[in-house]
Amino acid sequence: MKITDSIKMAITTLLANKMRSSLTMLGIIIGNASVISMIGIGQAAQQLAEEQFESLGANVLFVVPGSRESRRTTFDTPKTLVLSDAEAIATQVPTVTEVAPQINSRLLVTYGNRNNNVSIIGTTPEFLTVRSFDVAQGRFITDLDVRRNNRVVVLGSQIVEDFFLGENPIGKRLRIKNVSFEVIGIMESKGSFLGTNQDESLYIPLTTMANQIVGKTSNYGLELSFISVTARSPQDIFAARFQIENLLRLRHKIVREDDFRVETQKDILNIVGTVTSGLTIMLGAIAGISLLVGGIGVMNIMLVSVSERTQEIGLRKAIGATEGNILSQFLIEAIIISATGGIFGTMLGIGVLSSIALMSPLPTTVSTTTILLAVGVSGGIGLFFGVVPAQQAAKLDPIVALRSA
């Protein structure tokens, strides 16, 4: 029997039992759509993280207090970086152009009858260039503000919407931890970064933050949350990292483990990539379970089909059909069910990803490779789970099959 005849016969049989064939496909459709959706979401999360880190600039480094071990074993941020460290980096590291020390906290902010806990960032004028931020209205913090401990504040764009409700905030006063500050500027919208809305922050002079808001918490100077550094060029990144590490080891008199870390954009991307890759694998594996269940459904229905078609199988073998002919017919039926379910499942998965892309910032896309792989896997599942029923049908004795009819 020709393969084309087997395909025609398989299609005719499946169409004769439309409801059963459709329900069998449903398991494959759901499983396939789940795999494509979950893998697509994982890949989109990784791509979004990469895009956000690339927006920082290729030549940005972050000096973070505490070693990896100390940050894993304590809830409190280690107090090992101080303002004099940032000043030393700025003056003694030749491959560095800008240094922006930073103190972060989350405090109560009040304006009129509106109040909320928001992110407060104490920093210096260099913050704008190092972190690639822009001012939309008014001005940013100046060196004079830092030297004089001025009570001035620059607002994130979301803060303006939440607190001022259409008012022009420039010149108005709000309170941070019961200390009054004058609004001098509004930042350009920056969007979210790793799940944190950067437009929900306030910016005040570093010295004002230390002396009037959080207080001095380190015995060695003005404690910092971290230091952002700009190297002269992307090619100077590793030289700058080496020089900063050596300088801080000398300053901190370190003989064993460092009490700080210097992270480059690439380091952070590698960490994020490892996390998101693991997440993608986990999501794909969970979704793959539903595809496995769909395959078991295919095998179950094919076994029922074999028992129902015993007379047909016996008759075909009695008039000369070989075991190979019977085997191929049932395998083709299983493959058609799985491949068709795979195609519809792929379409459903693409639709789900398109909806997610419209409703969220995730840049979801589906590659041709993923589609071909998904449909191929679906067909493979049909082949794998169709073998047992097909073999059972092929080995039926024609006399016994005709007698049992």
Image (cartoon, rainbow, N blue to C red):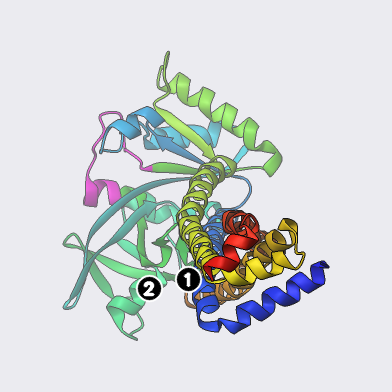
Among the 4 quarters of the image, the one containing residue 144: bottom left
Main SS, magenta region, reads loop
What residue does disc 2 label?
158
Magenta span includes 389? no
Query: Are the two marked residues, 2 and 1, in contact with CB atoms closer than 8 angstroms?
Result: yes
Q: Nearer the viewer, residue 2 or 247?
A: 2
Q: Position of residue 46 (x, y in %)?
A: 55, 55
At horizontal 35% and vertical 41% (from top left) the residue drawn is 224
User: Which circle's residue, 2 or 1, is located before the other in the chain?
Assistant: 2
At horizontal 23% and vertical 37% (from top left) the residue drawn is 217
The magenta segment: 208-225
**Would you say 280 lies left or right of 312 here?**
left
Amino acid at pointer 2: Gln
Secondary structure beneath dot 2 equals helix
Q: Position of residue 139 (x, y in %)?
A: 46, 68
89 lies above or below 146: above
Whether residue 279 is visible, yes or no, is: yes
Among the 4 quarters of the image, the one containing residue 243: top right
Q: Position of residue 150 (x, y in %)?
A: 31, 57
Q: Position of residue 325 (x, y in %)?
A: 74, 62
Q: Nearer the viewer, residue 56 or 30?
A: 30
What residue does disc 1 label?
189
Amino acid at pointer 1: Ser
Magenta span includes 217? yes
Number of residues whose C-alpha sits closer than 10 Å to that of mark 2, classed few (under 14), some (14–19) or many (20 or more): many
